[in-house]
Image (spheres, rainbow, N blue to C red):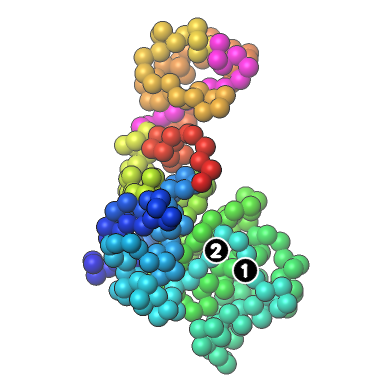
Amino acid sequence: MNASDVLRLSDVFKSYAGRPVLKGLNFSLAAGECVALLGPNGAGKSTTISLALGLADADSGTVHLLGQPMPKAGHAARQAVGVVPQYDALDPDFTVYENLLVFGRYFRIHGTELRQRADRLLEFAQLNSRRNDSVGTLSGGMRRRLMLARALINRPGVLFLDEPTTGLDPQAKHVIWDRLVDLKRQGVAMLLTTHYMDEAQRLADRVAVLDHGNIVVCDKPLTLIREVVGYAVLELWGIGAQHWVDVNHSQLQGVIERRGETYFFRNELADQVLAQMKASPQDDVDYIYRPGNLEDVFFSLTGRALRDD
């Protein structure tokens, strides 16, 4: 295990009811690093996190969290990590401030030290003005910020983030992002699972795409975009899009991808279609020319078929 790694899974296999979920998974997270773990439903993300936290035991392979073997040392290791689950687990019977105090006592933090930590975290989460309010009066964005503050009460070195901005409006989402960037600057390692590709691109030092029980790729977001997608994408849609593609198909040299009612062209082909659109605009066809992004990477590597399990 690398000395800088706070989490490492090596050659991990895991099955449920005879169904393989992880197939020789190798994954690591270094101190002060944010890695986004992406994958379609059923790819093994939840299982990976359960194993990392010592909540499940691998069939074979090894899992170490903060240098401790999991799940054998799970209780001790979990004392030094923070978890922000996808769904709120705040206590409705307590105020905002009391939620932090009660949670802190689970880590045997008491007295002045606990109150000082709670005060600092309320400032960090921009919730000091709501400290004495019931959590039931908070907006969705405020509740997510309180969940993040609560996960930090024990000053964790590793933070597990499961869909931290699900359901939030753009303003609330950006506030959460700002708080997470602050934590990364302070050296907190983060494992982020998200279906928001812009979130992964904004926050992650590396992006790991998990599919069919293994890591397909793991690299810097911009590196993946450059190597998997290229420099440009043109999206084409509208009532007349299919007709335009059918008429011009023989002239288009390259792969044409379709997602729903939208056609996608990349790089030189995107340039070609853009030139044709400018030269001969179509009233019933809309288009946008843009850089590649992580969503393009995701579709390229995992396909576009809907996963239900």
Q: In what quadrant of the picture does the N terminus appear?
A: bottom left
SS type, badge 1 = loop
Magenta span has 236? yes
Hey, what amino acid is under mark 1?
Ala
Q: Position of residue 258 (x, y in %)?
A: 49, 24
Element under disc 2: loop
Which residue, as the protein is rendered here, is positioned at the far left?
A: 2
Residue under the point 52% across and 37% down: 306
Extreme-bottom residue of the structure: 111
At a point 58% along the width and 80% down the height, the residue shown is: 103
Q: Which mark is residue 85?
A: 2
> What numbered label is drawn on residue 89?
1
Describe residue 156's horizontal placement relative to residue 171 as left or right. left
> Can you give x and y, in whole percent of width and height, for residue 154 in the image?
49, 79
**Residue at 32% from the left image edge and 45% from the top image edge:** 217
Above or below for 99 versus 180:
below
Figure quadrant of residue 129: bottom right
Q: Position of residue 112 (x, y in %)?
A: 57, 91
| Tag 1 near tag 2, CB within 8 Å | yes
Amino acid found under the numbered disc labelled 2? Pro
Q: Nearer the viewer, residue 232 or 5?
A: 5
Compared to residue 274, the image places residue 34 above or below, namely: below
Residue shown at the point (62%, 64%) measured from the top left: 88
Q: Cα distance, mark 1 to mark 2?
A: 8 Å
- Chain part drawn in magenta: 230-243
| Residue 207 visible (yes or no) | no
Foreground pick, 9 / 264:
9
Residue 174 is at least partly visible in this image: yes
